[in-house]
Image (tube, coloured by chain):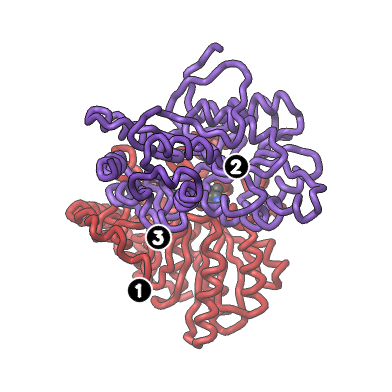
Chain colours: A purple, B red
Amino acid sequence: MTMALITYKEAVRQAMQEEMRRDENVFLLGEDVGVYGGAFGVSLGMLEEFGEERVRDTPISEGVIAGAAAGAAVTGLRPIAEIMFSDFITIAMDSLVNQAAKMRYMFGGKAKVPMVLRMPGGSGTGAAAQHSQSLEAWLVHVPGLKVVMPSTPYDVKGLLKTAIRDDNPVVFIETKTVYNKKGEVPEEDYAIPFGVADIKRVGKDVTVFATGVMVHRSLEAAEILAKEGIDVEVIDPRTLVPFDKETLVKSVIKTGKLIIVHEACKRGGFGGEVAAEVMESEAFDYLDAPIKRVAGKNIPIPYCMELEKSAVPQVDDIVNAVREIV
Amino acid sequence: MTLNKETLLNWYKKMLHTRFFESQVDAFFAKGMIHGTTHLSIGQEAFAIGSTAALHADDLITSTHRGHGECIGKDADLNRMMAELMGKSNGYCKGKGGSMHIADLEKGNLGANGVVGGGFAIAVGAALTQQMKKTGKVVLCFFGDGASNEGSFHEALNLASIWKLPVVFMCTNNHYGMSMSVSRSTAVANIADRAASYEMPGITVDGNDPIKVYEATLAAVERARSGEGPSIVEGITYRWLGHSKSDANRYRTKEEIEAWKDRCPIKAFEQYLIKNNIISQQESDEITAGAKDDIVRAVEFAQQGSYPGIETLEEDVYA
Ligand SMILES: Cc1ncc(C[n+]2csc(CCOP(=O)(O)OP(=O)(O)O)c2C)c(N)n1
Ligand SMILES: [Mg+2]
């Protein structure tokens, strides 16, 4: 395979472009996705290639963006809808949760809702409480939705293709602070199946399970800890629903120790679900220490930069947690 | 119209404050001294200042992401505004809110908002309080042209109308919501046209003329205060600068921007004041210099402030 070094943002764009070239039913809609190229420049150039018919600027109306995507999806199109910041999913919630997620089941398995709702999530940009949240746990809780949270250019491209080809509503949470991070991505067509975790670093002493930007911080922490002779395994689930329990359980059986790292608030976060899955599994007997969660504080994200950093796990917090447990 | 010299000069000064405050913020952004994002209202000052001038000191407002002018109109302290943008503990929100969340509850400013359309329902609720408690106060709900396409706009206007709430919906129509022009985003030509659906008056005025804005707002505020219910007041204006820090202005032309700069609301108001012998050029220059000094002092105040301590991180989540 020939590889190209591209940014996360470019990888998202390429996945959309390649799928739109492949399937005329795929189109993009959202606020300022056209001439502006999206608030983060993700769709720059797509209007020029596909025209206004398939790269559709919408008014500021999240409810109808998500709802129209559902309606178009159930009648034969395959929309990719962008919500400018994941925080504004709140406004799209009825369309997504009560409509898109439930149609198939409620209608006795007759409907298909092949839509992707893309949105950048997370803190770290100094944009304060209404532009910085990590709300994935809300979405994980809703049967009928798939929830994807890629951390690298390779993963985001392969998973977005799968999301677009999937016949279900997929919430696709992009990690905004890594939009400009580069990584190797195959030039050929590829797709990454849902429900397959990626072991981002193989280790034997402790399992660190991390999502989104925390994958990168955990890998940095692992390098620091390696110098102290601690060998960390880093697991990135990549998709939260469906969830690859097997890879995690195997890792915990090997290491006997589990630390779960996410940016979202600890209370009610996805980490609690992961811990419970492990406790209910055969890995329980292999645990040498209580499972630890390193997660966001139970507070809105503050504006001041120092406070913002302190609100969510940093590399040091992960390093310290590992030292405490090993 | 009883607009005396003192009143008009107060407006002039507030428009200058808004302009200089935001120019300073823009410069600090470029130098990395202010972080995050900010939305500047340069070119739109007359609407914010002319409209808030129609309020009593204890009336209320809800503001938007582009709300510095509305804060200043509602007599906010420039020092604490600047400190907030610099993330300092002596800022309006103790450094926790930033530009998009300045709130001054004591002066009746219920807050800027990072969520487009986030203020409609809050304003309606605040107006309900005034009605139920018979306070005689009125709420001005500021919003952008783009915000009127959120569902909450329609829900809020309908409710305000059937309950005859003392709220006035103030649309800053600056022609764009980010890259979307009103003609592309909105089915009606003027946002005020939407008033018809909710059986309320809707008026569109020159948003660059503070006197016209004041007069239209005052009429709507008096109507609301007397129990006759809500209105829409729309001011046509223009955002000179990019939407926020990330805007390459791909959706509009240089010519269009320049044409609106020629219609500078502050320059026009200065000329009005001079032509009508309200002030001399020299007085105008003095007021301008004074307004600039006020911003210098605000910067000093902000720079002297400290960053909020880590012990404040988990404070104020609950009452
Ligand atoms: C619910 C929501 N959707 C999208 C955004 C992103 N956004 C911030 S300002 C803006 C444009 C708002 O346009 P308008 O209401 O006309 O106000 P203006 O920016 O022109 O002052 C957009 C899309 C947001 N902050 N909140
Ligand atoms: Mg606008």
Q: Are marks 1 and 3 on the same chain?
A: yes
Question: Could you tell me which residue is drawn at 60 percent across and 74 percent down?
Answer: B230
Tell me, yes or no, whether the two marked residues, 1 and 2, touch with CB atoms within 8 Å.
no
Question: Could you tell me which residue is drawn at 27 percent across and 56 percent down?
Answer: B83
Q: Secondary structure at mark 1?
A: helix
Mark 3: amino acid: Leu
Looking at the image, is A102 positioned above or below residue A250? below
Q: Chain of mark 3?
A: B
Q: Residue furthest left?
A: B304
Question: Could you tell me which residue is drawn at 42 percent across and 58 percent down?
Answer: A267
Name the residue that disc number 3 marks.
B273
Q: Secondary structure at mark 3?
A: helix
Q: Residues within 10 Å of mark 1 (few under 14, many from 20)?
A: few
Drawn side of residue B21 relative to residue A85, left or right: left
Looking at the image, is A235 positioned above or below residue B289? above
Q: Is mark 2 within 8 Å of ligand 1?
A: no
Q: Chain of mark 2?
A: A
Q: For residue A242, which numbered disc appears in the image? A: 2
Question: Which mark's residue is nearer the viewer, 2 or 3?
Answer: 2
Question: Which mark's residue is nearer the viewer, 1 or 3?
Answer: 1
Q: Secondary structure at mark 2?
A: loop
Q: Is residue B247 visible in this depiction of the protein? A: no
Quadrant in the picture for the C terminus of chain B: bottom left
Front-lying residue, B96 or B137: B96
Question: Could you tell me which residue is drawn at 33 percent across and 47 percent down?
Answer: A289
Quadrant of residue B235 in the image? bottom right
Between the C-alphas of marks 1 and 2, the distance is 49 Å
Front-lying residue, B306 or A141: A141
Name the residue that disc number 1 marks.
B106
